[in-house]
Amino acid sequence: MDIEITGIGGFILLVLNIWAFVSIISSNATTGRKVIWCLLVLILPLIGFLIWLFAGPRGARHTA
């Protein structure tokens, strides 16, 4: 089973993963959880992003 993401699909996945990293780092989760989530997204880019999307910590929301 060989999954290869290239071209525009790879670029879109890169942008989504950067968004995930920023959101994880700006979340209110503990440092340990942030490291685990970042490693998951880094090691398994597509699957890690999907798992984070449904179950991961979100960035801190500012309410006025």
Image (cartoon, grey):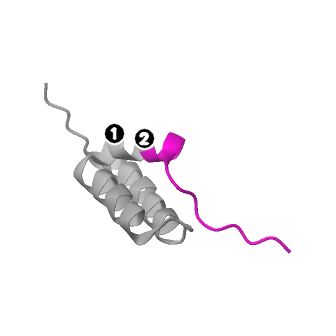
Q: Does the rendering let one see residue 17?
A: yes
| Label 2 crowd (10 A; few <14 / some 14-19 / many >=20) | some
| Residue contact between numbered discs 2 and 1, judged by CB atoms under 8 Å | yes
Q: Does the rendering let one see residue 9?
A: no
What is the x, y in percent for residue 49?
Answer: 40, 46
Q: Is residue 60 left or right of residue 40?
A: right
SS for dot 2:
helix
Q: Quadrant of the C terminus?
A: bottom right
Return the residue at label 1.
47
Q: Residue at x 33, y 53 (%)?
A: 41
Q: Residue at x 37, y 49 (%)?
A: 13
The amino acid at mark 2 is Ile
The magenta stretch spans which residues?
52-64
Res. 2 image quadrant: top left
The amino acid at mark 1 is Ile
Q: Residue at x 70, y 67 (%)?
A: 61
Q: Nearer the viewer, residue 13 or 40?
A: 40
User: Please, which residue is most extreme toward the top here?
Assistant: 1
Q: Quadrant of the N terminus?
A: top left
Q: Is residue 38 left or right of residue 2?
A: right
Res. 62 image quadrant: bottom right
41 versus 31 height, above or below: above
User: Please, which residue is most extreme toward the right here?
Assistant: 64
Q: Nearer the viewer, residue 34 or 18?
A: 34
Return the residue at label 2.
51
What is the x, y in percent for residue 51?
Answer: 42, 41
Magenta run includes residue 34: no
